[in-house]
Amino acid sequence: MLEGATAVVSAITAGYQEVVDQWARGRSALDGLVSDLNTAAAQVADLNARIRSTAAAGGSVNELVDQRAAVAATLAALGGGEVRHRDDGTVDALIGGNPIVQGTSVNRLAVTGAARVQDAAADPVQVEWAHRPGTPAGVGDGEIAAHVSLLAPAQPTGTGGVLAEAAATYDALAADLAAAVNAVHTTGTTTSGAPAGDVVGFPPGVSAAAGLRVVVTAGGLATAAPGAGPLDGSVADAIAAIGRGAGSPGAVWAAFVTTTGAAARTANDRADPAALSARTAVDLQLSTAGVDLDEETMNLLTYQRAYEGAARVMTVMDEMLDVLINRTGVVGR
Amino acid sequence: MSAVIGRVTSGMTARAAQHHLQANLQRMSTLMERASGQRAILRPSDDPVGTGDSLRLRSEQRAAEQHARNTQDGLGWLTVADSAIRTSVDLLVRARDLALQGATGTASQQARDALAEEIDGIRDALLTEANASYNGRSVFAGTSDAGVAFSEDGTFQGVPGSSVVRRIGPDEQLRVDVDGAAVFGSGAGSVFAVLETLAADLRAGADVSGSITAISERREEVLGHLSQVGVRYNRLEAAKVATEQRLGRIEAGIVEVEDVDLARMIIDLKSQEVAYQSALGVTARVLQNSLMDFIR
């Protein structure tokens, strides 16, 4: 029985640890994304400056504009937002209505908040303007917004970030399980007649799911109710009954597994149409911007024929001049 | 998709072909994973409802297996108790016969001494039966851990009023031990005390009719317990069959929820393979030609 308890406890702590690790990975990925966004914004501002000065000097800015468009696309993929063109050839990039690039100046974004899922509730992760600390930047789109919503703290209604909700469920499960088992177990006595202690416990200061441990030893297991004889099994039977019923830890766990499964399935189902519409959008863009080999070949042929035609005209003119210059006065000779 | 787009470029065709090939390959890998693992549910998102059912069925299965083990254990207890009580009844019948022989006035003192000797032997045999044990626990001692139900001098060692119960179904518990104090009696009325008195009376040449009545009464009492044990044994046998049937139903449910239908899986896999191959073939045909191949 102790082996079974240890297996359950280690499954809970391992599952919890995985969620914690995944949250930490998401957090560091968010840092990277925001720094990418800042770099892209700086590049756009730099290109703005060069385009303006080149245009003022009367040079060609087409290549620079192409480059800027590519960087702006990265910017949009990371943080959503919109791009506005100005008369002097520069662009402004806006995120959540506020400029991240304005002409040649850049406003940087920063990530603040907890570095661990355990602290996420007290200190939620948010993306804010570096020059205006404390106010969320309102990144509503793109990879960064997706990461922020993933790292959101758990809510009592269960509508918080997926990972924090999972961690909270693990915690609640561990605490419930420990409380239920210990409450029944401590009413019993061990085979030697001593009053029983706790079966599982967690050290203070650590979340229930992370610190859950089996604290009872084989000799400290209480199976008997007091006064019912040393080898009585009624407390063991009562502990076995904890697993049944509506609010039991088993039911909580089953609800968590099916809810997570259903959520993952819904997300999968939603991802398919989203991918389809994304693909359609890219196709629409490519249908105007893309290059088709057949079309280019046709154009090439047209120009080649035109060139040949022009060359033929040259030949004809050359022959005409030849007649005029070299044959003049010798007609009939 | 391309219906609403006026212009199709070779790059778009290549992209679309790549996407469809990838989708085909993904479907095939999922099917292959299921077929090779022989499981319909690889992760909860494959079938959330099925996962819930599977969790419930598995927990019921574990409980039913434990109930089956409990029932088996209970049958062991009752078998031991049954045989001990049966032997005790035989011994009591023999003791009563001996007492009747001793009660006839014609018996010589020598004969009565011999009878007393045999009564002592019967008492010891009864003590052994009363201390019959199963798996190291005395079946007549209740929840006591004393090791024996009756000590050498016939004192009951068990926990009075306690009972050993086994859970044999989700809502059913059954007592699998027998109260030693009720079967063999305790104190002055115990079968051991009665036989000791009988032996002493025989040796002293006193009247033994009181002991004969006491032995008869004790025999009736023990027979009553024997029939109770029989009833409970039957109840356990019925529970064992019921648990086995329940286990069968649960296992059938688990198979239905978790296992793949192999024939269907192979057909799906085969048709997916055909789809993938045709996609590969079509892609190879479409993408290799352009206008460049036809002008020189």
Image (cartoon, rainbow, N blue to C red):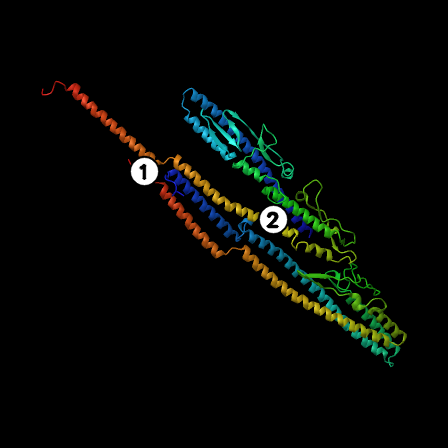
Determine the residue located farthest toward the bottom in the rendered image. Answer: B106
Name the subunit of mark 2. Answer: A
Give the residue at mark 2.
A256
Name the subunit of mark 1. Answer: B
Determine if residue A71 is in view.
no
- Figure check: B4 above or below B228: above
- Figure check: A19 above or below A196: above
Give the residue at mark 1.
B291
Q: Residue at x 36, y 44 (%)?
A: B285
Measure the alpha-carbon separation of dots 1 and 2.
Answer: 59 Å
Name the mark on residue A197: none
Quarter where residue B15 is shown:
top left
Determine the residue located farthest toward the top in the rendered image. Answer: A329
Say what amino acid the circle numbered 1 marks: Leu
In the structure shown, which secondary structural element does the residue marked by tag 2 occupy?
Answer: helix
- Figure check: B102 above or below A73: below
Q: Position of residue A323 (x, y in %)?
A: 16, 21
Say few, some or many: other residues with alpha carbon within 10 Å of mark 1 (under 14 / 14 to 19 / 20 or more): few
Determine if residue A306 is in view.
yes
Say what amino acid the circle numbered 2 marks: Phe
Determine the residue located farthest toward the left in the rendered image. Answer: A332
Give the camera-side residue of A250 and B193: A250
In the structure shown, which secondary structural element does the residue marked by tag 1 occupy?
Answer: helix
Q: Position of residue A311 (x, y in %)?
A: 25, 26
Q: On the same chain: label 1 and label 2?
A: no
Give the camera-side residue of B126 and A211: A211
